[in-house]
Amino acid sequence: MSLQMPMVSIIVPAYNVDRYVRRAVQSIQNQTFTDFELLVVDDGSSDRTGEILDALAERDIRMTVFHNQNGGAPAARNYALDRARGTYVMFFDADDWAEPTMLADMVAYAEQNRLELVVAGFYIDTYYGKGNDFVTEVKACPSNVYHTQQEFRAAAWQLFDANQLYPPWNKLFLRERIERIGLRFRPTFWDDFPFVLDYVRDVERVGVMEQPYYHFIRQRVESETARWRPDMYDKREEEHGWMLDLYEHWGLSGDPSSMEMVQRRYIERLVGCIENVCSPECDLPTEEKKRLIAEMISTERAQVAVAVARPRSRMMKAMLAPIKSQNAALAYREGTFISFVKRHNTKLFATLKARR
């Protein structure tokens, strides 16, 4: 490895992704911008992931592979962060891929505007069936450089609304700032969201690029977002608390547009929690499921959110009706239907979710 500091450190945690990791790494290696280091952490894989990574690294001096015991994605990302040397940091998932001009365009944008954070558009490619059929959804906001911290904060609700501020992988982070604020990934399920929230909390120079580059792949039935999780509701409650705290810190807890987004975000995810309870993988008795749903939808938080939220579609408005009326039986039937569609018609589920 050259002693010269690379412009970008690209960090990839990899665990049992031997079917996908070659495409991910090669999409990085084939970037038109070449001044980067690629730090891949094999997180205790039991398949051929490690072998594939070692073979790819043999032909590329920019790539370093670390073989660690399984500790989860947060630990893997932090391990690589501790060793990163780039001016900027980019995170990448081992089953995704990127367009070849991603780094060149994002680095040029950051350098030209002296940015602490670059946020680019991205694709969600949802695969369905047994072949290579997929539907693509583009998540993006118009290109803009926010010249002041307050300007960014006032517009952030639009970025949250377009899913631009949740994931770490459509972004270029200034590494000096990561180190200055002592930021690392928390050892928790869905660890990327709090990392981004902590970074944007007091960020000053932010630029948005409308062009999508990164392809987030939805196809693995074993992925984190597809499982039944007994702790999902508690996690969503925690996340909502983070969002409320962020907007209070920003002095925008009274801003109508920002608060409508925060409350709509919460209530949409509450629907996801209801669907999670209604999944066949949840082995609780039906009456117990209904009891849990009744508890979820009757809280003050839920009722405030459903009163403030302004659904963007008639479908979403109908889905919120059982929550507004606190009708647990109807919410259960709705959650069971959503779960059925999610499991049996991935294409339809992805299309409906995109239009909510």
Image: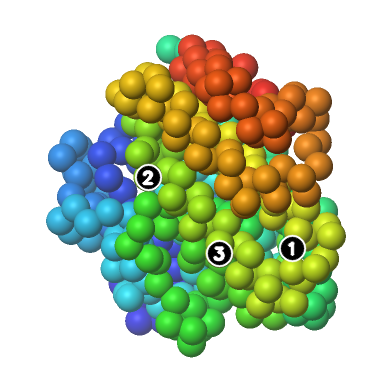
Percent x, y of residue 79:
29, 68
Which residue is pictured at 43% across the width and 43% down the height?
A: 232
Near-viewer residue (278 or 140): 278
Can residue 95 be seen at all in this image of the molecule?
A: no
Nearest to viewer (mark 2 / mark 1): 2
Does the residue at mark 2 contact the one at mark 3 (Cβ under 8 Å)?
no
Q: Residues within 10 Å of mark 1 (few under 14, many from 20)?
A: some
Which residue is pictured at 77% across the width and 71% down the height?
A: 252
Query: Which residue is denoted by mark 2 in the rendering?
Result: 231
Q: CA separation, marks 1 and 3?
A: 15 Å
Q: Residue furthest bottom?
A: 180
The answer to whether 40 appears left or right of 271 in the picture is: left
Query: Which residue is denoted by mark 3 in the rendering?
Result: 242
Nearest to viewer (mark 1 / mark 3): 3
Residue type at the position of mark 1: Ala
Q: Residues within 10 Å of mark 2 (few under 14, many from 20)?
A: few
Residue 22's disc number: none
Residue type at the position of mark 2: Asp
Near-viewer residue (177 or 350): 350
Percent x, y of residue 81:
37, 71
Near-viewer residue (32 or 217): 217
Q: Exactly how many numbered labels are in the figure?
A: 3
Q: Residues within 10 Å of mark 3 (few under 14, many from 20)?
A: some
Percent x, y of residue 74:
34, 60
Near-viewer residue (29 or 75): 75
Residue type at the position of mark 3: Trp
Query: Which residue is denoted by mark 1 in the rendering?
Result: 156
Quadrant containing the N terminus is: bottom left
Q: Quadrant of residue 77?
A: bottom left
Quadrant containing the C terminus is: top right
Q: Quadrant of residue 240?
A: bottom right
